[in-house]
């Protein structure tokens, strides 16, 4: 099938056309696997939520990395990677242009491939930082440890806190609570994984809007891209790691999958909950 008369080289609709990009159409929304992605993403009963999300985010980055490698393949005709500064002078997707902060913390526009390389370096740095993703989650740091009756003083003796209500939840009696606290993750952990997810979303948006046709359609890999992306979105929605603002460039495809029952219902829906048999609803909340 030829796409040249139907749309641009990226698979998007031509200017003035009412037809959506190819990747927003039902006939191109197929996946390479069948099954319930919500069950695949749900937290196992005996796994602490921070540990599960840490594992899941790392796995999602591994899948995205494979898709990024596809757009870095060198084109035999040009001798340049498929995604290069000439083809993609900015990191953009469907009218959205993403900027990077320079050394003076000022937003600047840079080529998409440069942006993606910086994102990869930044994410790998986060994942490999034991202060953010501790390798020994069985050892909770002293700074995070508290007693129900008070907090640890420098000398190690419990110090009394102010009066509390007997009806207060245990987590409140024990001091501040946060996602992954019991497994040794820092208080910033939820914010960190949400930031990682936001940057990965931008990479997926650019891959679709800039490279769906070349190379994914041309090499017959668009179903693999769809499968990685639906799994990414499913986890993000299920655990409130990403909001509608971030997913806007890809919302038509997300809505299409949602209508087929392949993704969780919209936020606020009574049906919007992980499978109970796999560990119950997530504790994390969107910010």
Image: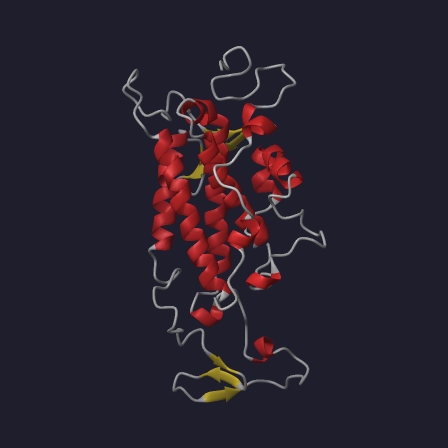
To which quarter of the image does residue 22 belong?
A: top right
Looking at the image, residue 130 lies above or below residue 247: below
Q: Colour scheme of this structure image?
A: secondary structure
Give the left or right position of residue 80, taking residue 217 as reference: left
Looking at the image, residue 241 lies above or below residue 113: below
Position of the C terminus, as image quadrant, is: bottom right
In the foreground, 4 or 158: 4
The residue located at (56%, 64%) in the rendering is 279
The residue located at (67%, 85%) in the rendering is 166
Expressed as whole percent of the image width and height from the top left, the position of residue 123 reads: 38, 48
Looking at the image, residue 224 lies above or below residue 171: above
Expressed as whole percent of the image width and height from the top left, the position of residue 57 reads: 45, 52
Expressed as whole percent of the image width and height from the top left, the position of residue 254 reads: 60, 38
Q: Residue furthest toward the top?
A: 5
The residue located at (63%, 77%) in the rendering is 169
Looking at the image, residue 44 lies above or below residue 212: below
């Amino acid at each position: 099938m030829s796409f040249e008369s139907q749309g641009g080289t990226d698979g998007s609709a031509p200017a003035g056309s009412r037809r959506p990009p190819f990747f927003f159409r039902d006939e191109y929304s197929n996946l390479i696997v069948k099954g319930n992605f919500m069950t695949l993403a749900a937290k196992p009963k005996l796994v602490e939520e921070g540990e599960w999300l840490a594992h899941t985010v790392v796995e999602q980055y591994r899948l995205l990395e494979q898709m990024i490698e596809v757009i870095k393949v060198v084109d035999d005709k040009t001798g340049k990677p498929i995604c290069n500064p000439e083809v993609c002078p900015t990191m953009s997707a469907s009218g959205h242009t993403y900027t990077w902060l320079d050394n003076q913390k000022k937003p600047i526009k840079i080529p998409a491939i440069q942006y993606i390389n910086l994102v990869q370096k930044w994410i790998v740095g986060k994942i490999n930082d034991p202060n953010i993703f501790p390798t020994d989650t069985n050892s909770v740091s002293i700074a995070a440890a508290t007693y129900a009756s008070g907090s640890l003083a420098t000398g190690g003796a419990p110090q009394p806190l102010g009066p509390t209500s007997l009806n207060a939840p245990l987590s409140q009696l024990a001091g501040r609570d946060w996602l992954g606290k019991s497994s040794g993750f820092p208080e910033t952990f939820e914010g960190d994984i949400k930031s990682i997810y936001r940057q990965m979303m931008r990479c997926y948006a650019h891959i679709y809007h800039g490279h769906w046709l070349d190379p994914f359609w041309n090499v017959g890999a668009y179903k693999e891209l769809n499968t990685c992306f639906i799994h990414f979105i499913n986890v993000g929605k299920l655990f409130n790691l990403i909001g509608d603002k971030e997913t806007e460039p890809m919302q038509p495809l997300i809505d299409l999958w949602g209508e087929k029952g392949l993704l969780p219902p919209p936020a606020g829906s009574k049906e919007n909950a992980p499978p109970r048999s796999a560990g119950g609803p997530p504790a994390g909340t969107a910010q």
